[in-house]
Amino acid sequence: MKNFENALLLLARILMPILFIAAGYGKLGASYAATQQYMQAMGVPGALLPLTILLELGGGLAVLFGLLTRTAAMATAVFTLLTAFIFHSDFSQGVNQLMFMKNLTIAGGYVLLFVSGPGALSIDRLLNKKW
């Protein structure tokens, strides 16, 4: 049963960060300036965009490979909750209610990963770390 559990944790670590890796990578190119302007229009300093990319891309890769898994999972959960409240709390805008609930669901998954840890098939386990 433990092997099955570890395989499912690996599957979760593969599936969960796909959105963040793609989003972080996408912000590196031509959309960098537009993303920065959007952040500023929403009251978030554009200077935070490099940290956003680091969290999305770096944190996503960390979760994928199971390195600093609990730290990356909790940081991603907090980030996702913040983005829900900052960018998706105006429910008069059509899709925002759905996006808000999506972010809550994603944050819940990352909190669960924080609690459970990365499983045996991870770099954290190879290094015998529980961060």
Image (cartoon, rainbow, N blue to C red):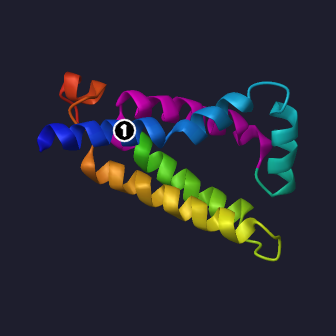
Determine whether 27 is above or below 1 in the image: above
Q: How many marks?
A: 1
The foreground one among 51 and 2 is: 2
**Place of residue 109 in the rendered image (x, y in percent of width and height, measured from the top left):** 42, 55
Residue at the extreme bottom of the image, as rendered: 92
Residue at x 82% of width, y 40% of height = 36
What is the quadrant of residue 9 in the picture? top left
Is 51 one of the magenta-colored residues?
Answer: yes
Q: Residue at x 85, y 26 (%)?
A: 30
From the viewer's side, name the closer residue of 99 and 78.
99
Q: Is residue 122 visible?
A: yes
Q: Which of the two residues, 118 or 58, is positioned nearer the viewer here? A: 118
Q: Residues within 10 Å of mark 1 (few under 14, many from 20)?
A: few
- The answer to whether residue 119 is left or right of residue 17 is left
Reply yes or no: does residue 61 show up in magenta.
yes
Magenta stretch, overall SS: helix
Segment tinted magenta in the rendering = 45-71
Q: Quadrant of residue 89?
A: bottom right
Image side of residue 108 versus residue 129, left or right: right
* Residue in view at x 68 percent, y 33 percent: 50
Q: Which quadrant holds the N terminus?
A: top left
Secondary structure beneath dot 1 equals helix
Residue position marked by numbered label 1 in the rendering: 11
11 with respect to 1 (left or right): right
Which residue appears at 77% of the width and 47% of the height? 45
Q: Amino acid at mark 1?
A: Leu
